[in-house]
Image (cartoon, rainbow, N blue to C red):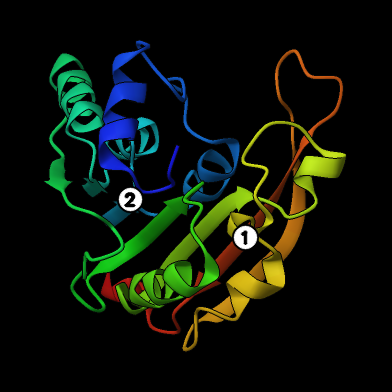
């Protein structure tokens, strides 16, 4: 399946009730549990598991994905939970968020070739408001050999150093390989994690 093949992703989302599960990613939960809610942007949100969790904690969330099927699932879940999110149907490789508009920007498991991912992450970094935070997490380049699951194509896998190089203007808080437990697997998955912040007065949120 092509990485950014909208028709193929729509079909994948049709085939099961929840492709990624309903719980937020463990790193999203750990980081954002400690932050004061504000405006959040979730790029390539899929069915919205992270976006819905953020909205449930009081964040004002803009959730972007190109799969109409995934967004429909997200909207249905939002209605069922009484949550209000801004769902945006757009290809994130061409989507340009408003600069300095979000207190948190999330890019989770969006795997693209470096020449496509780089500009996207620079745009994500530019969208972070003063005092705000960018979180990027995805399968690490070592995962196929040493971890479990995820894409096998080295051209779309992450390294922490490469992620850090795509976010000029932000302060790097964390850029490292991390382990993530996978139920039923005999070893953890390996992810690259980037947490970066834009200097500023957090009280301005």
Front: mark 1 or 2? 1
Going 43% across and 21% down the picture, which residue do you hit?
19
Res 35 label: none
Residue situated in front as seen by the camera: 89 or 136? 89
Q: Is 164 located above or below residue 88 in the figure?
A: below
Residue 42 bears which disc, if any? 2
Using the image as rendered, state which of residue 37 and residue 54 is in the foreground: 54
Q: Position of residue 104 (x, y in %)?
A: 37, 60
Q: Give the secondary structure at mark 1.
A: helix
Q: Give me the residue at 33% from left, 75% from top.
A: 123
Q: Position of residue 195 (x, y in %)?
A: 57, 64
Residue at figure coordinates x 27%, y 66% from the top left: 102
How many angstroms separate mark 1 from mark 2 (CA)? 23 Å
On residue 155, which mark appears?
1
- Seen in the picture, residue 204 relative to 64 is either above or below; the reply is below
148 vs 79, left or right, is right
Mark closest to the chain's N terminus, 1 or 2:
2
Mark 1: few/some/many CA within 10 Å (<14, 14-19, 20+): few
Residue 17 image position (x, y, % from top left) = 34, 11
Can residue 56 be seen in the rendering of this structure? no
Q: Are marks 1 and 2 in contact (CB under 8 Å)?
A: no
Quadrant for the N terminus in the image: top left
Q: Is residue 162 visible?
A: yes
């Amino acid at each position: 399946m092509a990485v950014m093949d909208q028709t193929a992703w729509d079909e994948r989302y049709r085939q099961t009730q929840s492709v990624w599960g309903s719980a937020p990613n463990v790193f999203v939960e750990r980081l954002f549990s400690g932050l004061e809610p504000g405006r959040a942007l979730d790029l390539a949100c899929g069915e919205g598991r992270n976006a819905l969790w953020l909205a449930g904690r009081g964040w004002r969330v803009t959730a972007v994905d190109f799969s109409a099927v995934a967004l429909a699932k997200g909207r249905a879940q939002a209605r069922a939970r009484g949550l209000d999110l801004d769902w945006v149907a757009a290809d994130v490789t061409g989507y340009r968020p408003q600069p300095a508009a979000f207190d948190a920007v999330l890019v989770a498991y969006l795997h693209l070739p470096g020449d496509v991912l780089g500009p996207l992450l620079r745009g994500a970094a530019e969208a972070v408001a003063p005092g705000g935070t960018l979180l990027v997490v995805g399968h690490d380049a070592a995962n196929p050999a040493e971890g479990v699951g995820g894409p096998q194509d080295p051209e779309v896998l992450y390294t922490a150093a490469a992620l850090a190089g795509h976010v000029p203007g932000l302060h790097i808080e964390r850029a490292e390989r991390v382990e993530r437990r996978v139920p039923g697997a005999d070893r953890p998955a390996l992810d690259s994690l980037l947490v970066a912040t834009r200097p500023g007065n957090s009280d301005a949120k």
